[in-house]
Image (cartoon, grey):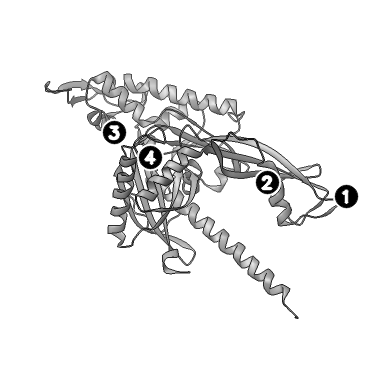
Amino acid sequence: MAKKDKYLVGLDIGSTKTCALLAEIENQQVRFLALGAAESKGLRKGLIVNLDSTVSSIRRAVEEAESVANIPVEAATIGVAGSHVRGVNSRGGIPLGPRSRDIERDDVRRAIDAARSISLPADREVLHVLPHEFIVDAQDGIRDPVGMVGQRLEANVHIVTSSIAATQNLVTAANKAGILINDTVLEPLAAAEACLTQDERELGCCLLDIGGGTTELIVYGGGVVRHTGGVAIGGDHFTNDLAVGLRTPIPEAEKIKRHHGCAAANLLRQDNSIEIASVGDRPPRTIFSHMLTDIIEPRAQELLALIADDLRRAGLDSQIPAGFIMTGGGARLNGFAEFAEQGFHLPVRIAEPRGIQDLPEQVAQPEYATAIGLVLYAAKARRNAQQRSGNFVAKLKSMFVGV
């Protein structure tokens, strides 16, 4: 492995902040090196609205990571999210011949290609094709059909599509900041790499990535992705509600939300007095904790209702017994996990991303789950590519044995 191939970079460009996480592969293990973070001003709901501001945020985050690790960043894996991302389930299959025969890896690829052949508008592209299960003749529920015998092979897959323009704008912003993009990955899929246990994936769970502008969700069941979706409410909506309701500047509202906010009145332990700044030159005012909760709780109820509607439409509202795992900065809202647990009558936990060695405690936090997951996703993709390369070399060698 070339020296520069040792390094992996996850680039998470969010509505609130941009993160660049730098790691290295060492003896098949991923080790943390540095994290750079910068305020984002060029994105809204996952879409770039100001290219120059986005480029500047990327550059600042990458330069911070470079200065800590003393390693130049040349390429990265980037996260994609927002209202333009959509997921759909599809099925397709291929005949294997008039007689039953062994199924080979190439047959699996062709069956997946048949399943992914859906009609897409000209402005959309396929981001991921995630297999659910395979069907050999009449037998369903098969994880890996290679080596089995049959006459027809079908595949059920989940296809994630995105806007070509929205994704290309992210790549362009990174390129202008001097970063090549190796891969584009759905953000909740990346976060799942860092946050979910295998038991949760098998039993059925929903990961909620609560960002600044949107909340992305991904549902697992039977060990595979069953559904992806999103709702257009994130942490910034709570902040804006507080800014309007309390007539205070947005930075002040964000600070108040983080230090004093609570998701529900029945979870408020003390009704403390809080001094807040006023707009313009007016003097500061004193408010009480319950006044914050009166503003925050309706928005929290709306967010949970939209998530429930999304799961109901997908027919998965009763198929996530392992409950919800919350990531993203919005997951930090005091009492929100408990409020969701009461609302859904399911277990809810705040994610603690893991999977990278030497990860500092201040980085092993829900707001960095996507950046950590992007690095883990890139590491897995690299290992799979090396295995495929190794298999190809082995096949070549076997062709020449005895020649």
Q: Is the residue under label 1 in contact with that under label 2 (CB below 8 Å)?
A: no
Earlier residue among tags 1 and 4: 4
Name the residue that disc number 2 marks: 113
The residue nearer to you, when weighing 71 against 138, is: 71
Label 2 SS: helix
Mark 3 vs mark 2: in front: 2
Q: Residues within 10 Å of mark 2 (few under 14, many from 20)?
A: some
Earlier residue among tags 1 and 3: 1
Mark 4 vs mark 3: in front: 4
Tell me residue 178's x, y (percent).
Answer: 36, 53
Name the residue that disc number 4 marks: 14
Between the residue at mark 4 and the residue at mark 3, the CA separation in whole angstroms equals: 18 Å
Q: Residue at x 60, y 29 (%)?
A: 314
Label 4 SS: loop
Q: How crowded is mark 3: few (under 14 residues within 10 Å), some or many (20 or more)?
A: some
Is residue 168 found left or right of 219 in the rendered image? left
Is residue 120 found left or right of 8 in the rendered image? right
Amino acid at dot 3:
Arg
Which of the 4 image quarters holds residue 66? bottom left
Between the residue at mark 2 and the residue at mark 1, the CA separation in whole angstroms equals: 21 Å
Earlier residue among tags 4 and 2: 4
Q: Residues within 10 Å of mark 1 (few under 14, many from 20)?
A: few
Between the residue at mark 1 and the residue at mark 3, the CA separation in whole angstroms equals: 65 Å
Earlier residue among tags 3 and 2: 2
Name the residue that disc number 3 marks: 258
Label 1 SS: loop
Q: Which residue is drawn at 52% across and 31% down?
A: 346
Earlier residue among tags 2 and 1: 1
Label 3 SS: helix
Mark 1 vs mark 3: in front: 1
Identify the image quadrant of the C terminus: bottom right
